[in-house]
Image: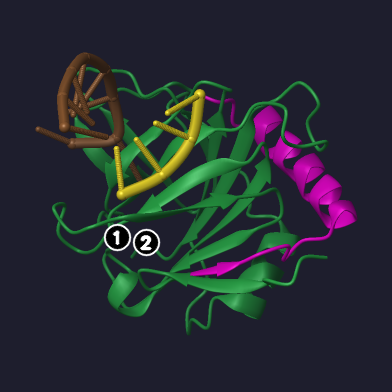
Chain colours: A green, B brown, C yellow
Amino acid sequence: MGILQELDLNGVRIIQEALRPEAQVALLEEVRGILRAAPLVQPVTPSGRPLSVRMSAAGDYGWITDRGGYRYEARHPNGAPWPPIPDCLLELWELYAEANRLPESCLVNWYAPDARMGLHQDNDEADFSQPVLSVSLGDEARFRVGGINRSDPTRSVWLKSGDIAILHGKARLAFHGIDKLRPNSSRLMPSGGRINLTLRVVT
DNA sequence: TAGTATCG
DNA sequence: GCTC
């Protein structure tokens, strides 16, 4: 175990090694179940540009982007309701989120080895007093965090498999993104890539 | 503008 | 190549 277990990145709380390897394996199996019920899709921005990340979701709502805009939807684009959020993720929320509501959405983001996520805000939710909690699985990723204005200075950290990041308080609306993955940096998924699970209160 | 390209 |  490393010495550093927790750090603050522009107000974003990073909990390193929150999940032991066995818990990561179990969570990965839950994710595979979600993806059987709700297959990954490659979304496009409202301007029509594809995201490099592929997405699915669990819970009452999933986050969607297409030519119609950014929004939450109660159903997968194929018309099926999203599968339930696994209990182990609800337990992580209770343990770390310090929220007074339960998450209504678990976004599942699949990063192929060359996928990235540009700097953005999570601002399609109704209640910004509720935190956003994300779990990393698989390859390490450079996570960049700024402030509430796009021009604010940024800092970055390498997120590893099993790490948790929480956008809360004044950092709830912090701009953030994923610069790049570090290839072959995890034994969890030997074929490479990264999964990010993001729990949010939507309404 | 949850995109991409580019720079010192 | 990496960082900001």
x 78%, y 31%: residue:
A189
Whole-number angstrom distance, CA of label 1 to CA of label 2 = 5 Å
Vertical position of residue A11 compared to residue A33: above or below: below
Q: Which residue is mark 1?
A: A125
For residue A42, side relative to residue A128 (left or right) = right
Between residues A135 and A68, which one lies in front from this camera angle? A135
- Binning the other alpha carbons within 10 Å of mark 1 as few (below 14), some (14 to 19) or many (20 upward) gives some
Asked which secondary structure carries label 2, the reply is loop
Vertical position of residue A189 compared to residue A124: above or below: above
> Number of labelled discs?
2
Residue A75 visible within the image:
no
The amino acid on which the numbered mark 1 sits, given as a three-letter code, is Glu
**Residue A33 on the magenta span:** yes
- Binning the other alpha carbons within 10 Å of mark 2 as few (below 14), some (14 to 19) or many (20 upward) gives many
User: Where's residue A153, x and y in %?
Assistant: 22, 58
The chain ID associated with circle 1 is A
x 70%, y 48%: residue:
A161
Vertical position of residue A29 compared to residue A155: above or below: above
> In the image, which residues are magenta?
A13-40
For residue A30, side relative to residue A90 (left or right) = right
Q: Which residue is mark 2?
A: A202
The chain ID associated with circle 2 is A
Which quarter of the rendering shows the N terminus of chain A? bottom right
User: Where's residue A172, x and y in %?
Assistant: 33, 69
Vertical position of residue A93 compared to residue A115: above or below: below
